[in-house]
C-alpha cells in the first residue's frame, strides 16, 4: 500500500510543481500577470451606487485559483512523501500532507490578495467627484435624454466621466457641479 501512496504523493507534487514552474516562467517572461483560471465573483451592485455606495469586483482571498490549488498539490505531495520516507504511518502522513497543503493554499491566497490590495492603492475613487465643479467635455442633453461627458480634477488628476442632467441642456466647455454618483462612472450634474 505504501508504494501506491508514495506514487500518489509524488504525482501530486509533480503536477502541482509543474504548474507552479510554468506560471513562474509566464510571469518572468511576460506571459501574463493575472492568475490563469482564477474564479472571480462579481460583487458590484449598481443599485448601491444610487445610495452613494460603490462596489467593485472582489474575489475575496481567491482560495480556488490555479496558483493556490497547485501550491496545495505540491506541498501535499511533498509532505506526504516525506512522511512516508520518515517511516510514519499512512494515516499520519495523510494528516500532515493535508495540513501542509491547506497551509500553503491559504498562504498563497493571502499573499496574492495582499498584493492586489497594494496594486489598488493608487486608483482614483470616483465618489470624491461629488460636490466638485467639473467642465463639460461633450454636450449634455436636457432632462436626462442622453449622456454627455465631463472632466473633473480628482486626486491630482483630470478624469473623464459620463454625465446627465435633469435640467436644460448644458453646452460643451460649461462649468457644472457634480450632484451625485449614479454608477461607478456616471454622475448627475447641474449647471452653475
Image (cartoon, rainbow, N blue to C red):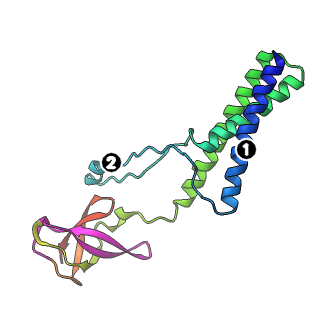
Q: What residue lies at 75% left-to-right and 32% top-to-bottom?
A: 11
Q: What residue lies at 18% left-to-right and 78% top-to-bottom?
A: 192
Left or right of residue 162, residue 122 in this image:
right
Magenta-highlighted residues = 144-169
Q: Secondary structure at mark 1?
A: helix
Which disc is residue 45 wearing? 2
Q: For residue 29, what is the image quadrant?
A: bottom right
Which circle, 2 or 1, is nearer the viewer? 1
Q: What residue lies at 10% left-to-right and 67% top-to-bottom?
A: 143
Q: Secondary structure at mark 2?
A: loop
Which quadrant: the N terminus? top right
Residue 116 point in image, percent of width and height: 56, 54
Count residues near mark 1 (Cα–Cα under 10 Å), then give few for <14, some for 14-19, many for 20+.
Answer: some
Q: Nearer the viewer, residue 155 or 165?
A: 165
Q: Nearer the viewer, residue 57 or 187?
A: 57
Is 160 inside the magenta-drawn segment? yes
Residue 45 point in image, percent of width and height: 32, 48
Residue 56 point in image, percent of width and height: 41, 52
What is the total number of numbered labels drawn onto the structure image? 2
Write down the residue under mark 1.
Answer: 18
Left or right of residue 34, residue 15 in this image:
right
Q: Which mark is first along the chain, 1 or 2?
A: 1
Left or right of residue 66, residue 10 in this image:
right
Instruction: Give the answer, above or below, for where 101 lies relative to 108.
Output: above
Count residues near mark 2 (Cα–Cα under 10 Å), then give few for <14, some for 14-19, many for 20+.
Answer: some
Is 32 inside the magenta-drawn segment? no
Instruction: Give the answer, above or below, for where 152 lies relative to 112.
Output: below
Which disc is residue 122 wearing? none
- Rounded to the nearest angstrom, the CA distance separating label 2 from label 1 is 39 Å
In this view, which residue lies farthest toward the right? 86
Q: What residue lies at 83% left-to-right and 16% top-to-bottom?
A: 89
Q: For residue 64, what is the image quadrant?
A: top right
Amino acid at each position: 500500500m505504501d508504494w501506491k501512496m508514495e506514487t500518489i504523493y509524488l504525482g501530486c507534487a509533480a503536477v502541482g510543481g509543474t504548474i507552479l514552474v510554468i506560471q513562474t516562467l509566464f510571469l518572468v517572461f511576460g506571459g501574463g500577470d493575472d492568475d490563469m483560471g482564477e474564479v472571480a465573483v462579481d460583487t458590484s451592485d449598481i443599485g448601491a451606487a444610487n445610495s452613494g455606495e460603490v462596489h467593485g469586483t472582489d474575489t475575496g482571498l481567491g482560495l480556488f485559483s490555479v496558483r493556490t490549488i497547485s501550491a496545495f498539490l505540491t506541498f501535499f505531495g511533498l509532505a506526504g512523501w516525506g512522511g512516508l520516507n520518515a517511516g510514519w504511518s499512512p494515516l499520519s502522513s495523510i494528516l500532515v500532507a493535508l495540513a501542509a497543503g491547506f497551509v500553503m493554499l491559504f498562504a498563497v491566497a493571502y499573499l496574492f490578495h495582499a498584493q492586489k490590495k497594494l496594486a489598488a492603492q493608487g486608483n482614483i475613487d470616483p465618489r470624491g467627484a461629488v460636490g466638485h465643479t467639473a467642465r463639460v467635455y461633450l454636450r449634455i442633453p436636457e432632462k436626462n435624454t442622453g449622456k454627455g461627458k465631463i472632466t473633473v480634477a480628482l486626486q491630482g488628476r483630470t478624469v473623464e466621466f459620463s454625465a446627465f442632467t435633469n435640467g436644460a441642456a448644458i453646452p460643451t466647455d460649461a462649468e457644472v457641479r457634480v450632484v451625485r454618483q449614479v454608477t461607478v462612472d456616471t454622475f448627475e450634474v447641474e449647471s452653475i
